[in-house]
Every structure is written in structure tokens, then in C-alpha cells.
Image: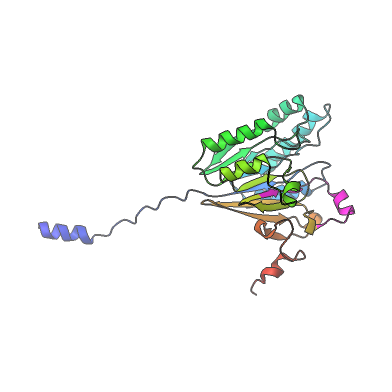
């Protein structure tokens, strides 16, 4: 009897081993500037596409209202928050842009209507997101850098780490091959792989010392002046939003140009842009030669 019970135990079907859940497996979307000078139907198209993709959450890079008019400030916030409430069903994180915040009163209203302070951090699964404020400064003030270091030091085991702020003051030094600024040193020290900004109404991306700096361009803000000067897709001047997939410690960004009134619907991996596009700008699919 004992031998039979032992054999039954040895040869009985065993439950499949429980596999640990991946540290990260989620998607989020990023919106570029809605203003200045919001163009008709562009922002709504971007919101519609994002809603259909159903990300885990949405981050916008700032300049959600036209601003700089105390008499219309609250009216403009009520307008855009109404749009968000009707179009964005996921958690929505805001970043302060220079059209959103220009003095203490506008900063108060920004917090009141978005529900976010000027600087904050959050985690999602095992990823860390740090949001800084340079709405009223070209670069990042010492207070912002101190806050960044404090958050990175407090979350050393989180991967990946992503940092967001509105104005891409890093653009000109990186274009010249210069990395001798305080932010870059902090990012390298703490192994931060991604920085995302907005403001310039153009897609920008540089990689230096393992840090990918990217500016999400316009999701509705005017680009007429750029187009008049002859800047176009190859210079990053196109309406778009960005889709992000986080798997483990890796982040993949896909840039989606709007179609219809907004553009030609081109879609490309952010890694295929380093200072300039590294693909056929007429049709990115031509370079990859997809099978028939």
C-alpha cells in the first residue's frame, strides 16, 4: 500500500510552476503641445487615436492652454479640462508649459485645474517617472535638479527611469556635441535612459552617453512659421503623438504622424531618428521593405 501511494504521488500530474509576473509590461501615450495657437481639429484627432489604442495612461508635455491672459485663464482651463474629461478615459498626467504657467497666479490655477503640482513623481509597476518644472525658466533651476536627485536616490531599484519637463534646453548643446551640463551628469550617474520634453513644436531626438533625449512635437500647436521657412517632416515639423511600450527595463517609442488634415500618417520607431531621420521620409516602410 505504501509503495502504491508513493508511485501515485510520484507520477501524479503536477501543477504548472507559477511564473513571476514581468516587472513591467504596459503602454502609455504622449501628447505634444496643444497650443500656442491651437489649430482646428488637430488635437481632437490625436486624442481620438489615443483613445482607440487604450493605453494605461496618458502624459502631455505641456502648453495645454493659450494662457498669458488673466481674464481668460480659468475659461481656457475649463475648456481643455472638459475636452480631457470627454476624450481621455485613462489616468492623465500633466506637465506645466510656458503657456500654462507664467506667474504665481497662473501656477495656482494650473494646479487647481490639472490636479498636479509643478513637480512630482510617480511609479507604475516597476518604472519611475519624474516630472520637473521649467515653465518660467529656459533651463532647470537648482531646486528642480535637487528634486530630481532626491527622487532618483529614493528609487534606485526602479527601471526604467524617465524624466519629463517642458522646455528642451538640452537641444542646442547636444546638437553641438556638448554634454557638460548638470542635468546630463545626474542622468548618467543614476542610469536614467529617457528624457522627454515639448515646447518646440517639432520632434527632436538625440542619444548621448546612453541617455535618449526626445521632444514630442506639436499635437495641435501652430507650425505655420516653420512651414513658411521650409521646414517639414525631415526637420521634425509634423503633427503627431507618441506611443510607448515598457517591457521589463526596455522602453520603445513609436511616433505616429497624424493623417487627413494633419499629415500623411507616417509611423516610425523613435530610435530611427538621431538628430535627423535615418529613413525614407516619404514613406518609412520603404526602408524596411515589408513583405507582400
Look at the picture and state if 215 lies above or below 155: below
Residue at 11% of width from left, 59% of height from top?
Answer: 3
**Is any part of residue 152 visible from this angle?**
yes
Look at the picture and state if 180 lies above or below 13: above
Q: Position of residue 12 (x, y in %)?
A: 24, 59
27 left or right of 139 in image = left
Look at the picture and state if 80 lies above or below 244: above
Query: Which quadrant would the C terminus be assigned to in this image?
Result: bottom right
Q: Give the range drawn in magenta.
A: 213-232
Residue farthest to the right, as pictured = 228
**Is any part of residue 117 visible from this angle?**
no
Out of 130 and 76, give the one closest to the viewer.
130
145 left or right of 236 in image = left
Rendering quarter of residue 147: top right
Rendering quarter of residue 65: top right
Q: Where is residue 283 in the image (x, y as percent from the top left)?
A: 74, 66
Out of 188 and 51, give the one closest to the viewer.
188
Out of 77 and 174, give the one closest to the viewer.
174
161 left or right of 170 in image = left
Rendering quarter of residue 263: bottom right
Check residue 176 for magenta coloring: no
Amino acid at each position: 500500500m505504501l509503495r502504491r501511494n508513493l508511485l501515485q504521488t510520484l507520477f501524479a500530474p503536477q501543477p504548472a510552476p507559477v511564473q513571476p509576473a514581468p516587472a513591467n509590461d504596459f503602454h502609455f501615450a504622449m501628447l505634444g503641445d496643444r497650443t500656442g495657437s491651437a489649430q482646428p481639429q488637430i488635437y481632437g484627432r490625436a486624442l481620438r487615436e489615443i483613445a482607440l489604442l487604450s493605453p494605461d495612461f496618458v502624459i502631455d508635455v505641456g502648453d495645454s492652454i493659450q494662457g498669458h491672459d488673466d481674464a481668460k485663464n480659468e475659461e481656457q482651463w475649463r475648456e481643455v479640462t472638459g475636452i480631457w474629461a470627454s476624450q481621455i478615459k485613462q489616468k492623465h498626467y500633466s506637465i506645466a508649459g510656458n503657456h500654462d504657467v507664467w506667474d504665481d497666479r497662473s501656477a495656482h490655477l494650473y494646479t487647481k485645474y490639472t490636479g498636479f503640482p509643478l513637480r512630482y513623481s510617480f511609479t507604475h509597476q516597476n518604472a519611475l517617472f519624474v516630472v520637473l518644472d521649467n515653465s518660467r525658466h529656459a533651463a532647470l533651476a537648482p531646486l528642480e535638479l535637487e528634486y530630481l536627485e532626491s527622487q532618483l536616490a529614493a528609487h534606485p531599484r526602479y527601471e526604467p527611469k524617465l524624466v519629463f519637463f517642458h522646455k528642451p534646453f538640452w537641444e542646442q548643446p547636444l546638437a553641438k556635441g556638448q554634454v557638460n551640463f548638470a542635468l546630463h551628469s545626474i542622468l548618467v550617474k543614476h542610469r536614467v535612459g529617457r528624457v522627454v520634453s515639448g515646447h518646440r513644436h517639432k520632434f527632436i531626438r538625440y542619444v548621448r552617453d546612453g541617455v535618449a533625449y526626445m521632444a514630442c512635437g506639436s499635437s495641435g500647436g501652430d507650425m505655420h512659421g516653420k512651414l513658411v521657412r521650409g521646414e517639414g517632416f525631415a526637420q521634425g515639423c509634423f503633427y503627431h503623438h507618441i506611443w510607448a511600450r515598457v517591457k521589463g527595463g526596455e522602453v520603445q517609442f513609436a511616433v505616429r504622424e497624424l493623417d487627413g488634415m494633419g499629415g500623411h500618417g507616417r509611423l516610425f520607431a523613435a530610435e530611427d531618428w538621431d538628430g535627423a531621420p535615418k529613413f525614407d521620409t516619404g514613406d518609412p516602410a520603404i526602408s524596411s521593405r515589408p513583405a507582400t
